[in-house]
Image (cartoon, rainbow, N blue to C red):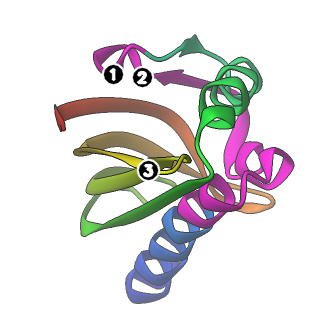
Amino acid sequence: MPNEALDRAHITDLLSRYTWALVDRDWQAWKGVFTSDAHVDYSTAGGPVGTPSEAAETFSQMLSMFDVALSAGGNIAITFDNEDTAKVRSVYTMTMRIPGDQPTYMQASGWYLDTIVRTAEGWRIHNRFEHLAYVK
């Protein structure tokens, strides 16, 4: 019988690893938080729809213009459908800096809607939808 408190901690850790892999631009680690058949949809922010590998390629190109891209997540709400599947909603804010004599800063914020599943390797994101709230 799964331990719900432990599962919540593992899912929260998974989302933290996603965020840090994005900040570090560690695309192998970033792809590692997803299932092998995951689907992602970042279209509300003008981003990719498809596989995590496709998204990682797009994001690595998009983020190359920034010398800093710091992401933070939180407000993680987890609802278990069953012992192996969870629906998760969490917020994010990402601050990016374009270098220069007078750097330009951008900030994006919104939330993710995820389906996260238990795999042999632990909890992984199976489906992710990003809802962009704003960019300034």
- Residue 136 is left or right of residue 28, and the answer is left
Give the alpha-carbon distance from disc 3 to disc 1, as whole Å.
22 Å
The residue that disc 1 covers is 45
Farthest residue, direction right:
28
**Residue type of the residue flagged with mark 2:** Tyr
The residue that disc 3 covers is 103
Query: For numbered disc 3, what is the local secondary structure?
Result: loop
- The reply to whether callout 1 and callout 2 are in contact (CB within 8 Å) is yes
Look at the image and give the residue range highlighted in magenta. Answer: 18-46
Q: Work out whether residue 81 can be spotted.
A: no
The residue that disc 2 covers is 42
The residue drawn where x is 79% and y is 53% is 26
- Please state the horizontal and vertical placement of residue 8, each as a whole percent of the image: 41, 77
- Please state the horizontal and vertical placement of residue 92, each as a whole percent of the image: 30, 55
Query: For numbered disc 2, what is the local secondary structure?
Result: loop
The residue drawn where x is 47% and y is 17% is 47
- Please state the horizontal and vertical placement of residue 36, each as a whole percent of the image: 78, 32
**Residue type of the residue flagged with mark 3:** Pro
- Please state the horizontal and vertical placement of residue 114, each as a whole percent of the image: 38, 41
75 is within the stretch colored magenta? no
Upstream in sequence: badge 3 or badge 1? 1
Q: Nearer the viewer, mark 3 or mark 2?
A: 3
The residue drawn where x is 49% and y is 87% is 6
**Residue type of the residue flagged with mark 1:** Ala
- Residue 24 is left or right of residue 76, and the answer is right
Query: For numbered disc 1, what is the local secondary structure?
Result: helix
How would you rate the neighbour count of disc 2 (Cα within 10 Å): few for under 14, some for 14-19, many for 20 or more? some
